[in-house]
């Protein structure tokens, strides 16, 4: 929890507005490496690919990716990842359309499609078979994505974002071996 709050405070100090969203990364059924990735190599590859995807965004402002992540394992055979993405709001301010492109695949240049493409590359899985592998988290009471605009001095939004980040910090579903929580470095 302390690390999450530290990252959120540092991000607010670095930029005027920060776009915050939650997504989950899941492995395909029967994916063999999902149970062997104790060192989160696939997640490290994902971050590398996502940084490339975001660098390709044409615009006046850089996205400045920062993040929190947690690896969880509940009743499924494989683990999965929970992400909180923190981006420069001037560059990216929505998850975008998170349904597949017409005809399948994820070819739009919005944040969700960039995340799907990055996860597909990291796990070396066909883009057309990525349905359900990246889930945009929705608010429990409404079918809208968990998205925030975090501003310095906006304690109300910070409290909501911190509460959302606390979900990543729960201990009961963490894997007892390996590294199960992390963040970007500022």
Image (cartoon, helix red, strand yellow):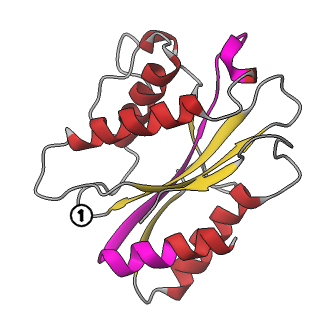
71 relative to 43 in the view: left or right: right
Coordinates of residue 76 in the picture (x, y in percent): 84, 26
| Residue under the point 30% across and 74% down | 15
- Report how many numbered discs are placed on residues in the image: 1
Coordinates of residue 38 in the picture (x, y in percent): 71, 32
45 relative to 62 in the view: left or right: right
Nearer to us in this view, 176 or 101: 176
Q: Looking at the image, is 86 positioned above or below residue 160?
A: above
**Quarter of the image where one finds residue 131:** top right
145 relative to 73 in the view: left or right: left
160 relative to 73 in the view: left or right: left
Q: Which residue is mark 1?
A: 90
Judge whether residue 97 can be spotted in this image. Answer: no
Viewport quadrant of the N terminus? bottom right
Secondary structure beneath label 1: loop
Q: Looking at the image, is 87 positioned above or below residue 77?
A: below
Q: Is residue 33 magenta?
A: yes
Farthest left residue? Answer: 60
Judge whether residue 46 can be spotted in this image. Answer: yes
Coordinates of residue 53 in the picture (x, y in percent): 29, 36
Nearer to us in this view, 55 or 33: 33
Which contiguous range is marked in magenta? Answer: 8-34
**Quarter of the image where one finds residue 54:** top left
Q: Is residue 167 magenta?
A: no
């Amino acid at each position: 929890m302390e690390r999450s709050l530290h990252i959120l405070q540092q991000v607010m100090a670095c930029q005027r507005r920060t776009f915050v969203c939650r997504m989950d990364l899941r492995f395909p059924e029967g994916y063999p490496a999902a149970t062997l990735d104790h060192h989160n190599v696939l997640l490290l590859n994902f971050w590398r690919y996502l940084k490339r995807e975001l660098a390709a965004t044409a615009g006046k402002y850089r996205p400045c990716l920062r993040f929190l992540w947690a690896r969880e394992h509940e009743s499924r055979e494989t683990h999965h990842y929970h992400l909180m993405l923190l981006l420069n709001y001037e560059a990216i301010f929505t998850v975008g359309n998170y349904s597949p492109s017409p005809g399948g695949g994820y070819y739009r240049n919005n944040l969700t499609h960039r995340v799907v493409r990055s996860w597909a590359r990291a796990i070396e899985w066909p883009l057309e078979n990525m349905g359900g592998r990246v889930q945009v988290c929705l608010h429990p009471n409404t079918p809208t994505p968990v998205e925030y605009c975090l501003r310095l001095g906006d304690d109300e939004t910070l409290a909501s974002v911190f509460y959302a980040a606390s979900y990543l910090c729960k201990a009961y579903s963490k894997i007892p071996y390996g590294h199960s929580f992390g963040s970007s470095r500022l």
